[in-house]
Image (cartoon, rainbow, N blue to C red):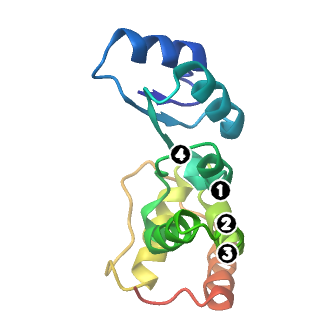
Amino acid sequence: MQDMTGAVIAPGMLADLSSAHENLCYAKIETLPTPNRFSDTVELAGNRLSMFGGANGVFFIEEMRRGAKGTMQGIALCDVVRKTWDAFQAGNEIAAESMWNLYQPLVKLYTLGEGQLYWIAKEILRRRGVFTCAFPRLPAVKPDPITYRELDALMERLGVARI
Protein backbone atom coordinates (compact mmCIF):
# COMPACT_ATOMS: atom_id res chain seq x y z
CA MET A 1 0.00 0.00 0.00
CA GLN A 2 1.11 3.51 -0.60
CA ASP A 3 -0.17 6.35 1.56
CA MET A 4 0.49 9.66 -0.16
CA THR A 5 -0.91 13.13 -0.59
CA GLY A 6 -3.84 12.83 -2.95
CA ALA A 7 -4.36 9.15 -2.06
CA VAL A 8 -4.25 9.23 1.74
CA ILE A 9 -4.73 5.99 3.64
CA ALA A 10 -5.32 6.65 7.33
CA PRO A 11 -3.25 4.64 9.83
CA GLY A 12 -6.41 2.88 11.03
CA MET A 13 -7.25 1.77 7.51
CA LEU A 14 -3.67 0.60 6.92
CA ALA A 15 -3.95 -1.53 10.08
CA ASP A 16 -7.41 -2.85 9.19
CA LEU A 17 -6.39 -3.79 5.65
CA SER A 18 -3.22 -5.54 6.83
CA SER A 19 -5.28 -7.45 9.39
CA ALA A 20 -7.89 -8.49 6.81
CA HIS A 21 -5.40 -9.50 4.10
CA GLU A 22 -2.35 -11.48 5.22
CA ASN A 23 -0.43 -10.76 2.02
CA LEU A 24 -0.81 -7.03 2.53
CA CYS A 25 2.27 -6.52 4.64
CA TYR A 26 4.17 -3.52 3.23
CA ALA A 27 3.30 0.17 3.33
CA LYS A 28 5.01 3.25 1.97
CA ILE A 29 4.10 6.22 4.14
CA GLU A 30 4.37 9.59 2.36
CA THR A 31 1.59 11.80 3.66
CA LEU A 32 3.21 14.53 5.71
CA PRO A 33 4.02 14.61 8.53
CA THR A 34 5.24 11.02 8.17
CA PRO A 35 6.64 10.56 11.72
CA ASN A 36 3.16 10.87 13.26
CA ARG A 37 1.70 8.48 10.71
CA PHE A 38 4.45 5.93 11.47
CA SER A 39 3.75 6.11 15.21
CA ASP A 40 0.00 5.80 14.75
CA THR A 41 0.29 2.91 12.29
CA VAL A 42 2.73 0.98 14.51
CA GLU A 43 0.38 1.44 17.46
CA LEU A 44 -2.57 0.08 15.48
CA ALA A 45 -0.93 -2.55 13.25
CA GLY A 46 1.93 -3.76 15.45
CA ASN A 47 4.40 -5.78 13.43
CA ARG A 48 1.90 -6.83 10.74
CA LEU A 49 3.18 -4.07 8.46
CA SER A 50 6.70 -3.39 7.28
CA MET A 51 6.76 0.33 6.68
CA PHE A 52 8.96 2.36 4.38
CA GLY A 53 9.28 6.11 4.28
CA GLY A 54 8.85 8.23 1.24
CA ALA A 55 8.50 11.95 0.68
CA ASN A 56 12.08 11.98 -0.61
CA GLY A 57 13.49 10.97 2.75
CA VAL A 58 12.76 14.31 4.41
CA PHE A 59 11.96 12.46 7.68
CA PHE A 60 14.26 9.46 7.13
CA ILE A 61 15.86 9.57 10.59
CA GLU A 62 12.56 10.14 12.39
CA GLU A 63 10.99 7.26 10.44
CA MET A 64 13.81 4.88 11.39
CA ARG A 65 13.27 5.80 15.04
CA ARG A 66 9.69 4.66 14.58
CA GLY A 67 10.56 1.35 12.97
CA ALA A 68 10.93 2.09 9.25
CA LYS A 69 12.42 -0.74 7.25
CA GLY A 70 13.88 1.76 4.81
CA THR A 71 13.02 4.73 2.65
CA MET A 72 12.21 5.22 -0.99
CA GLN A 73 14.16 8.40 -1.55
CA GLY A 74 15.34 9.66 -4.91
CA ILE A 75 17.99 7.46 -6.50
CA ALA A 76 20.60 10.19 -7.01
CA LEU A 77 21.79 9.84 -3.40
CA CYS A 78 21.24 6.11 -2.83
CA ASP A 79 24.80 5.71 -1.55
CA VAL A 80 24.17 8.39 1.09
CA VAL A 81 20.88 6.71 2.06
CA ARG A 82 22.77 3.42 2.47
CA LYS A 83 25.55 4.94 4.61
CA THR A 84 22.95 6.68 6.78
CA TRP A 85 20.98 3.44 7.16
CA ASP A 86 24.11 1.46 8.01
CA ALA A 87 25.19 3.95 10.67
CA PHE A 88 21.71 3.96 12.22
CA GLN A 89 21.46 0.16 12.19
CA ALA A 90 24.92 -0.09 13.79
CA GLY A 91 23.57 1.95 16.71
CA ASN A 92 25.29 5.19 15.77
CA GLU A 93 22.20 7.36 15.55
CA ILE A 94 24.13 10.60 16.01
CA ALA A 95 26.43 9.85 13.07
CA ALA A 96 23.47 8.81 10.92
CA GLU A 97 21.56 11.98 11.73
CA SER A 98 24.61 14.18 11.17
CA MET A 99 25.29 12.60 7.79
CA TRP A 100 21.66 12.85 6.67
CA ASN A 101 21.36 16.45 7.83
CA LEU A 102 24.47 17.37 5.86
CA TYR A 103 22.74 16.32 2.62
CA GLN A 104 19.37 17.95 3.35
CA PRO A 105 20.00 20.89 0.98
CA LEU A 106 20.27 18.41 -1.90
CA VAL A 107 17.25 16.45 -0.64
CA LYS A 108 15.32 19.72 -0.49
CA LEU A 109 15.86 20.18 -4.23
CA TYR A 110 13.81 16.99 -4.70
CA THR A 111 10.77 18.85 -3.40
CA LEU A 112 10.61 21.15 -6.42
CA GLY A 113 7.20 20.87 -8.06
CA GLU A 114 6.11 20.55 -11.67
CA GLY A 115 8.44 17.64 -12.31
CA GLN A 116 11.57 19.72 -11.71
CA LEU A 117 12.78 17.09 -9.27
CA TYR A 118 13.25 14.68 -12.18
CA TRP A 119 15.59 17.14 -13.89
CA ILE A 120 17.53 17.62 -10.65
CA ALA A 121 17.78 13.91 -9.85
CA LYS A 122 18.99 13.06 -13.33
CA GLU A 123 21.41 15.99 -13.35
CA ILE A 124 22.93 14.82 -10.05
CA LEU A 125 23.34 11.35 -11.53
CA ARG A 126 24.87 12.81 -14.71
CA ARG A 127 27.34 14.84 -12.69
CA ARG A 128 28.18 11.76 -10.64
CA GLY A 129 29.03 9.82 -13.82
CA VAL A 130 26.01 7.49 -13.86
CA PHE A 131 24.26 9.05 -16.90
CA THR A 132 25.72 10.79 -19.93
CA CYS A 133 22.69 13.07 -20.33
CA ALA A 134 19.89 14.29 -18.08
CA PHE A 135 16.55 14.64 -19.83
CA PRO A 136 13.42 13.41 -18.05
CA ARG A 137 10.13 12.70 -19.76
CA LEU A 138 8.11 15.78 -20.51
CA PRO A 139 6.05 17.67 -19.41
CA ALA A 140 8.52 18.04 -16.52
CA VAL A 141 9.39 21.71 -16.18
CA LYS A 142 13.11 22.44 -16.43
CA PRO A 143 14.54 24.29 -13.40
CA ASP A 144 15.87 27.79 -13.95
CA PRO A 145 19.62 28.51 -14.36
CA ILE A 146 19.89 29.75 -10.75
CA THR A 147 18.75 26.35 -9.48
CA TYR A 148 21.52 24.70 -11.49
CA ARG A 149 24.09 27.12 -10.05
CA GLU A 150 22.79 26.30 -6.57
CA LEU A 151 23.14 22.61 -7.40
CA ASP A 152 26.74 23.20 -8.54
CA ALA A 153 27.57 24.97 -5.28
CA LEU A 154 25.92 22.29 -3.14
CA MET A 155 27.63 19.42 -4.90
CA GLU A 156 31.00 21.15 -4.61
CA ARG A 157 30.50 22.02 -0.93
CA LEU A 158 29.35 18.49 -0.08
CA GLY A 159 32.03 16.81 -2.15
CA VAL A 160 29.41 14.81 -4.03
CA ALA A 161 31.53 13.36 -6.77
CA ARG A 162 31.43 10.32 -8.95
CA ILE A 163 30.00 7.18 -7.40
Place of residue 81 in the rendered image (x, y in percent of width and height, measured from the top left) = 51, 66
Mark number, residue 68: 4
Horizontal side of residue 130 vs 29, given as left or right: left
Q: Quadrant of residue 147?
A: bottom right
Mark number, residue 61: 1
Secondary structure beneath dot 3 equals helix
Horizontal side of residue 112 vs 7, given as left or right: right
Secondary structure beneath dot 2 equals helix
Estimate the spatial distance between the alpha carbons at disc 2 and disc 1, rounded to whole Å: 8 Å
Place of residue 146 in the rendered image (x, y in percent of width and height, measured from the top left) = 70, 74
Residue 70 against residue 51 in the figure, above or below: below
Q: Nearer the viewer, residue 80 or 55?
A: 80
Q: Residue placed at 49% from the left, 51% from the top?
A: 71
* Labels 2 and 1: the sequence-earlier one: 1
Q: Which residue is mark 2?
A: 93
Q: Are marks 2 and 1 in contact (CB under 8 Å)?
A: yes
Q: Quadrant of residue 24?
A: top left
Nearest to the eye among marks 4 and 2: give it: 2
Which quarter of the rendering shows the N terminus? top left
Residue 7 against residue 96 in the figure, above or below: above
Q: Are marks 4 and 2 in contact (CB under 8 Å)?
A: no
Place of residue 120 in the rendered image (x, y in percent of width and height, measured from the top left) = 53, 66
